[in-house]
Structure formats: C-alpha cells, structure tokens
Image (cartoon, rainbow, N blue to C red):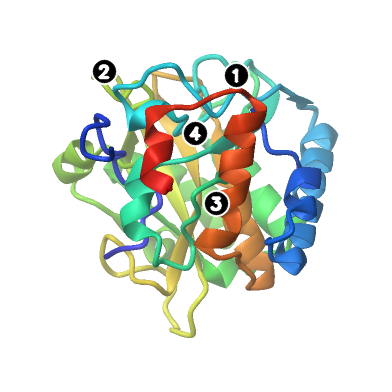
C-alpha cells in the first residue's frame, strides 16, 4: 500500500455501513500529549505566518457536509470554491476510505488541512513559492528531503524550483498524465467536486521521513519513506490557485511524532457530537 494521502474517497455509504480546536485535542485524556502540544504550536505558527503574509483566517465548516452519498456525509476537503482570496482556513476532515489504511503511521480518523488562496492574480509559480517559503523558511524543513509528484504541466514550475535550490530534474516525479487524470488523487489532478468533471492541476509535496538517501520517490505511489504533507495548485479553473498543508503531517515531519489511530477517534466523535452531527460515515469509524 502506498503512502498517498489523497487517494479517492469511497463513494456511497452502503459499503461503509465543527471544528476541533487545539484546546480540545490537548484536553482529551487519551491523547498523545506530547504530539498534541506540538500540533497546537504548529497551528499557531501557521496562523502567525499566514497573517504576516497578509492572509486572513476564515471559519472552517462543520465536519458534516449534508451530502450522505459521498464519503458518508463527512467533509473530505476544505471548500475550494468558498474560501475567499487572500484567506486561509484550518479545516477538520475525515475520510471513510482511510479506515482501511488505519495501520499506516500517518493516517488518522480526524486530521486538519490548512487551505490557502492567494490573491486573484496568483499563478502556479506564486503558489509554489508560497509553499516553499512556508516549509523551508518558516518551519525550516530540510530541502533535501522535499520532493514533488505531478504531471507534465508542472514543467512551468521548473524555474522556481531550480531557483529555490530544488532542481526540477531531481525533485519532481512525473506521472503519466492519463493515469493521474483517471486516479483523481491530487498528485497531478484533483476534482473539487467528486461527481464533476472539472479538475485542478496539482503538485503533491512529499517529505522523506525514512533513512533512504534519495532526492525524490522513484515510483508512484511513493514508499513508506515518503509522506505527503501538502499540495500546490498550479493550474485549472475548477477552483482558485492555492496551497494546502496537512497540519498533522507537517507536525510529523518536524517532530517525528504522531498519535495513534485510536488516540484520535475520541476527538472525531466529540467533534461530531459538539456540532450535533451524525453523518452515516461515522459508523465506519466505530
């Protein structure tokens, strides 16, 4: 099983039959306190960085979408279309399909995606620079451990990556375009509307957490030595260009710490209960 965090979410609920604040995570008795404290710090650092870059924080949506025939009614992505320009959001998410992958160290029943849309005149090079500034300048991630998975359209990012010390030829694993389009899993193409035909072009951002010495994955999906920590939207018209970062994955890359699946289950249920939501997909996590 590969370590791609954005594989297509299961459709329908027959096969599987709000907002979590840092204080809730820290207060949960069965949580990994060390991780949650680091996680809360990472969220605060993200907020401060985006504010310094001129972005305002938007309120996240409920964990429940009200669309029960997709992902069991649970929110699987931040709302690409609704997030305004020059704003960011910290969105709690849950993906029913992840239940089958709960043995993976970097998969959780509840996680947070930090989505950001720069100003309307942004292009793929703008979003690529923003992501790399956050990862390397703000958080100090090792550039030698950063790599990308995308499709041939990412060629336009070559000057930016080369300039910022991540040579395109060494750091980008290019997928077959038709294969990536069929997969719809964000390391190349992502469909904001899971039932629609409109897509955005992306570069999946991966971080090497293992001991192997390689500048980028050599095959897709990447092996366990690599974990996906975000995506850069570099093209397409289905949603504004932007970036997204998995906050728990970023914490993992920085600290090597990660809570267990069971340690986050209680927070997922508490989140839904707090919002008065009972999406059908919750049954898959019980």
195 to the left or right of 278: left
Q: Are marks 4 and 1 in contact (CB under 8 Å)?
A: no
Determine the CA span between mark 3 and mark 1. 27 Å
| Residue 154 visible here | no
- Counting the numbered discs, the total is 4
Q: Is residue 5 left or right of residue 30?
A: left
Front position in the image: 257 or 131: 257
72 relative to 144, above or below: above
Helix or strand or loop: what does disc 4 sit on?
helix
Which residue position is annotated with label 1? Answer: 83
Looking at the image, which is closer to me, 159 or 16? Answer: 16
* Residues packed near mark 4 inside 10 Å, few (<14), some (14 to 19) or many (20 plus): many
Q: CA distance from mark 4 to mark 3?
A: 36 Å
Instruction: Pinpoint residue 61: horizontal percent, then vertical percent.
Output: 60, 22
The reply to whether discs 4 and 2 touch (Cβ–Cβ < 8 Å) is no
Q: Which residue is mark 3?
A: 265
How packed is label 1: few (under 14 Cα within 10 Å), some, or many (20 or more)? Answer: many
Callout in the foreground (4, 1) = 1
**Residue 255 place in picture, x, y as percent:** 69, 70
Instruction: Compare marks 1 and 2 and give the one earlier in the sequence.
Output: 1
Q: Residue at x 63, y 73 (%)?
A: 256
CA gap, disc 1 to disc 2?
19 Å
Which is more foreground, mark 2 or mark 3?
3
Report the residue at 49% width, 27% height from top. Answer: 278
Name the foreground residue: 161 vs 54: 54
Q: Secondary structure at mark 3?
A: helix
Q: Is residue 188 above or below residue 168?
A: above
- Residue 90 is situated, as x and y percent measured from the top left of the image, at 66, 35
Q: Which residue lies under the disc numbered 4?
A: 124
- Name the residue that disc number 2 marks: 196
């Amino acid at each position: 099983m590969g370590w791609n965090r954005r594989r297509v979410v299961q459709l329908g609920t027959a096969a599987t039959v709000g907002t979590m604040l840092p204080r809730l995570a820290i207060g949960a008795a069965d949580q990994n306190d060390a991780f949650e404290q680091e996680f809360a710090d990472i969220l605060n650092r993200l907020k401060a960085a985006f504010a310094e870059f001129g972005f305002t924080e938007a309120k996240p949506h409920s964990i429940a979408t009200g669309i029960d025939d997709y992902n069991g009614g649970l929110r699987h992505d931040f709302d690409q279309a609704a997030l305004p320009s020059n704003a960011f959001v910290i969105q709690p998410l849950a993906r029913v399909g992840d239940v089958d992958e709960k043995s993976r160290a970097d998969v959780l029943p509840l996680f947070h995606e930090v989505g950001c849309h720069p100003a309307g005149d942004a292009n793929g090079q703008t979003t690529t620079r923003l992501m790399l500034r956050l990862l390397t300048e703000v958080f100090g991630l090792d550039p030698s451990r950063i790599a990308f998975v995308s499709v041939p359209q990412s060629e336009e990012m070559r000057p930016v990556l080369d300039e910022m010390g991540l040579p395109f030829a060494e750091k980008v694993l290019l997928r077959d375009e038709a294969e990536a389009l069929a997969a719809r899993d964000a390391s190349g193409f992502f469909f904001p509307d899971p039932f629609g035909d409109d897509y955005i072009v992306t570069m999946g951002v991966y971080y090497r957490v293992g001991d192997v010495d390689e500048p980028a994955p050599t095959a897709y999906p990447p092996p366990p030595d690599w974990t996906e920590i975000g995506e850069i939207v570099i093209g397409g018209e289905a949603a504004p260009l932007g970036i997204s970062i998995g906050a728990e994955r970023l914490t993992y890359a920085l600290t090597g710490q990660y809570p267990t699946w069971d340690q986050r289950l209680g927070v997922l249920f508490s989140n839904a209960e707090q919002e008065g939501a009972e999406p059908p997909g919750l049954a898959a996590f019980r």
